[in-house]
Image: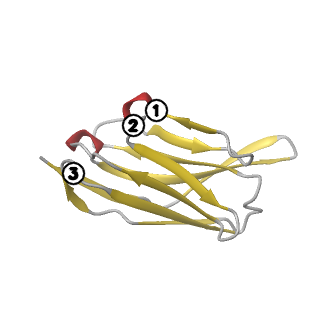
């Protein structure tokens, strides 16, 4: 059973920093593509940053230079380091794991962690 558990969300002032972490279990973590998404009220869920099993990183333009995604294959965790936070970064942040079984893509999600940035 795949489980993703996020932590680290909090209330922070504009310009502050937070570090989110996602612990994965039930998957072969090494080689699995991982990503962070976010969803603000009234908005669609959007990709924040992703890191492939091979370590290739992609980030949304809105967070480039401020957010960094990383993974620790020994601990089965993926982190999102966030700096220079803005009120528009306020959202629920979700961890995603993307697995391919027999050629079929399966996406798994955590329960989400709330990030609130006050102005």
Secondary element at image label 1: loop
Pointer 2: what residue? 63
Asked whether, in this view, residue 105 is left or right of residue 110, the answer is right
Residue 10 location (% of width, % of height)? 28, 63
Q: Residue furthest left?
A: 119
Pointer 1: what residue? 60
Check whether the beta carbons of the residues at disc 3 and disc 2 lie within 8 A of each other.
no
Pointer 3: what residue? 117
Check whether the beta carbons of the residues at disc 1 and disc 3 lie within 8 A of each other.
no
Q: Nearer the viewer, residue 70 or 112?
A: 70
Query: What residue is rendered at 35% in x and 52% in y?
Result: 92
Residue 1 location (% of width, % of height)? 70, 69
| Front: mark 3 or 2 | 2
Asked whether, in this view, residue 54 is left or right of residue 72, the answer is right
Q: Is residue 23 above or below residue 30?
A: below
Q: Dot 1: few (<14), some (14–19), or many (≥20) neighbours within 10 Å? A: few
Secondary element at image label 3: strand
Query: What residue is rendered at 77% in x and 62% in y?
Result: 28
Residue 108 location (% of width, % of height)? 62, 54
Q: Nearer the viewer, residue 20 or 45?
A: 20
Q: Residue furthest front?
A: 65
Residue 100 location (% of width, % of height)? 78, 46
Query: What residue is rendered at 65% in x and 71% in y?
Result: 75
Asked whether, in this view, residue 77 is left or right of residue 118, the answer is right
Q: Dot 2: few (<14), some (14–19), or many (≥20) neighbours within 10 Å? A: some
Check whether the beta carbons of the residues at disc 2 and disc 1 lie within 8 A of each other.
yes
Query: What residue is rendered at 33% in x and 49% in y?
Result: 83
Instruction: Give the Cα separation between the discs numbered 2 and 1.
Output: 6 Å
Instruction: Give the Cα separation between the discs numbered 1 and 3.
Output: 18 Å
């Amino acid at each position: 059973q795949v489980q993703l558990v996020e932590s680290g969300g909090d209330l922070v002032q504009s310009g502050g920093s937070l570090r989110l972490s996602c612990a994965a279990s039930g998957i072969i973590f090494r080689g699995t593509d991982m990503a962070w998404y976010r969803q603000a009220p009234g908005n669609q869920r959007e990709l924040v940053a992703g890191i492939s099993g091979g370590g290739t990183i992609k980030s949304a333009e809105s967070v480039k230079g401020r957010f960094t995604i990383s993974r620790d294959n020994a601990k089965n965790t993926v982190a999102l380091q966030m700096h220079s936070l803005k009120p528009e970064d306020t959202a629920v942040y979700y961890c995603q794991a993307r697995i391919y079984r027999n050629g079929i893509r399966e996406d798994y999600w955590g329960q989400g962690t709330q990030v609130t940035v006050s102005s």
